[in-house]
Image (cartoon, rainbow, N blue to C red):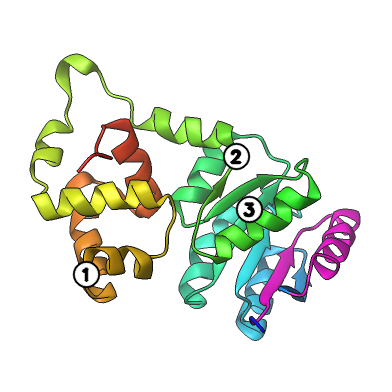
Amino acid sequence: MTTPIRILLVDDHKTMLWGLEKLIEGGGADLQLVGTASNNDTALQQAAALKPDLIVLDLDLEGRSSIEILPQLLQDNPGVKVMILSGNRDQGLLTQAVKLGARGVVSKEAAADVVLNSIRAVQRGETALDPALMNALLGQFSAPAQADPEATRIASLTPKERKIVALVVEGNGAPNKALASRLFIAEPTLRNNLTTIYQKLGVANRLELYVYATKHGLQAV
């Protein structure tokens, strides 16, 4: 049997937290609730103690933003994935969460199956983003057509790097291992290539690379 996804829930609303607990507990044998937290400090402590695979994180915790602890959660717990589940509609804040490393953003108004399937997708290494947020991310890479400052950056990519970018777009969240296999290279080599690509294009991670490539038509090899 597949090892269940070990989940830490972080939300300061007791009723919502209770509902999420029941949702995870009844969601299937592939999901396991290992703990809960209601504020930033407890979230950091529980993550360190329980070593979850995935953290479902609310953005507003007892009057503070969990954006403050997102980088530390990821840094102190290598391999953990974070999915934002929030009622906050501030696209700027949600975009910031993605830039800081969140792999999913789902509304608290989403249906139960959407929440559960998003958890599974994020754990698989995919992204789970609200369509409005994806549009906001695309908008951030808009540039005047008459003077595209990205032309030099794009031109600096080697043919091999262009192929990697195209596969990232085509894979739509596929794990590095799968992309490396298609390229017939080792996974560490792929990571090194991606780091170089990020530096050349001025993006921070694979999600930003996906958005950038889609915006500038780099999905074709």
The residue where tag 3 is placed is 84
Q: Position of residue 25 (x, y in %)?
A: 84, 70
The residue where tag 2 is placed is 130
Is residue 159 rendered to the left or right of residue 144? left
Q: CA distance from mark 3 to mark 2?
A: 11 Å
- N-terminal of the two: label 1 or label 3? 3
Asked whether the beta carbons under mark 1 and mark 2 sit within 8 Å of each other, the answer is: no
Q: Nearer the viewer, residue 129 or 97?
A: 129
Give the extent of the magenta segment: 3-29
- N-terminal of the two: label 3 or label 2? 3
Picture quadrant of residue 67: bottom right
The residue where tag 1 is placed is 184
What residue type is disc 1 on? Phe
Q: Label 1 neighbourhood size at 10 Å, few (<14), some (14-19), many (20+)? A: few
Q: Position of residue 139 (x, y in %)?
A: 41, 28
Residue 93 showing in the rendered view? yes
Taking the magenta stretch, the answer to whether it contains residue 10 is: yes
